[in-house]
Image (tube, rainbow, N blue to C red):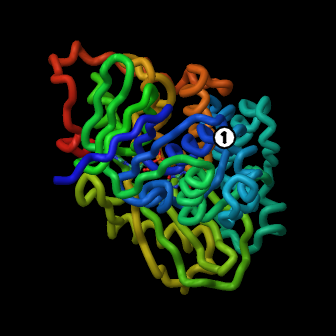
Amino acid sequence: MTTIRTLRTDVAVIGGGIVGASAALALRQMGLGVALLERDLCGSRSSGVNYGGVRRQGRPLSQLPLAQRAHRIWGRLPELLGIDGEYIRSGHFKIARSESDMASLERYRAMSSDFDLGLELISAARLREQCPWLGTRAVGGSLCVEDGQANPRLVSPAFALAAQRAGAQVFERHKVDEVAHDGALFMVRSGNALEVHAPVLLNCAGAWAGAIAERFGETLPLRSGHPVMAVTEPVPHFMDWSLGVEGGGIYCRQVARGNLVLGGGAGIALDADRARVDRDAIATLAVQAVELLPTLRHAHFIRTWSGTEGYLPDREPVLGPSRTTPGLFHGFGFAGAGFQIGPAAGEVLAELARDGRSSTPIDAFAIERFDPVPEPEPQPASTTASDARPH
Ligand SMILES: Cc1cc2nc3c(=O)[nH]c(=O)nc-3n(C[C@H](O)[C@H](O)[C@H](O)COP(=O)(O)OP(=O)(O)OC[C@H]3O[C@@H](n4cnc5c(N)ncnc54)[C@H](O)[C@@H]3O)c2cc1C
């Protein structure tokens, strides 16, 4: 018979994506004890398979304080993680394909002027001169010089490693299948292997966080989404910027090795955990890519993939205290845009764990914006999360 390992700490974290791992790192920097449980490998889900856009431009104003905080963290990446994660402030250029797109970019620049994003509008004439490689549908755009890109496969696991080096207890391949709260302490259990007791619990389980919230009587309209990604063979380097288009659609960046990483459209869930690209979405992406960058006409895609990300109806995360259970804090539902703000969300969660409040405004992300569910059915003292259904 195996004996379950039991430990007591200050904060238990469920989920080793960029949000949970950066929370663990920030908690250690505050001197708090932390145990992080990750079902797979840290950074192997959304946080490690995303496009790698580190972009503030285009975010809703509600997210800009958090994005600015994250921008400062990204600027200290080598000092924090010991690697640069291929993070570069390459510039993010949002393309206008019509005069009305251009007007909308101008409006965003005016609306976001308090945040010092340094947005610069670029006319069609200057674009033709500066970027002869851009297709003719681009009639101008908006450049955020200090936005950039990074390699998610390097950055996200590195946050967990840095947390571990700083003293966090990181348990990979430890799926949390049971959680409970006795009024003072949370109990978080992974099978017969580990039981963690802590007065604070951070729910950073990404697209799967709804199942954890539900255990505490908080049912949310969280659904999973699957952005489609593709990468081309290497081509001679021609572009530094990361590109997006106003109104959404394709996005694209070129890495130092010459490959173009592209995203756009929606993939297909195979089950609650796995997703793949959709053939039609890839065909559309290929057409859009050539329209945007004609030089890609003969480039081959060498790999396509997708991931599983949590979306709430307003595409804002839930970041803040639980409404039912003191000591429980949520950080999930980043709607395809949590890589850039993830490190700041982690710091905010650490502040909430230590102080009960955040020094960055997070009211827009309160769980209270969703209608409370009717009184939950009486629950036994502890319940299993293993019957979680896909959202
Ligand atoms: C294809 C794609 C492209 C994207 N592109 C960008 C982009 O360019 N820029 C950007 O800013 N954002 C982007 N995003 C969004 C970004 O990747 C996510 O918002 C961010 O990574 C979310 O981080 P997370 O830590 O909340 O979630 P995750 O990385 O999903 O981490 C959650 C972790 O919790 C673990 N977990 C779940 N349940 C349990 C359990 N019961 N027990 C233990 N562990 C559990 C999971 O295994 C997972 O590792 C993209 C997302 C995808 C999928």
Q: Is residue 305 above or below residue 347?
A: below
Q: Is residue 359 above or below residue 168?
A: above
Q: Quadrant of the C terminus?
A: top left
In x, y percent, where is residue 292?
A: 60, 67
Q: Amino acid at mark 1?
A: Gln
Along the line of sight, which residue is nearer the eye, 296 or 25? 25
Tell me which corner region of the image, top left, top right, bottom left or bottom right, holds residue 7. Answer: top left
Question: Does any portion of residue 100 appear in the rendered image?
Answer: no
Secondary element under disc 1, as helix, strand or loop, is helix
In x, y percent, where is residue 65?
A: 68, 32
Image point (60%, 45%), residue name = 25
Q: Which residue is mark 1?
A: 29
Along the line of sight, which residue is nearer the eye, 94 or 174? 174
Question: Does any portion of residue 311 appear in the rendered image?
Answer: yes
In x, y percent, where is residue 280?
A: 34, 67
Cβ of mark 1 under 8 A from ligand 1: no
Image point (73%, 77%), residue name = 238
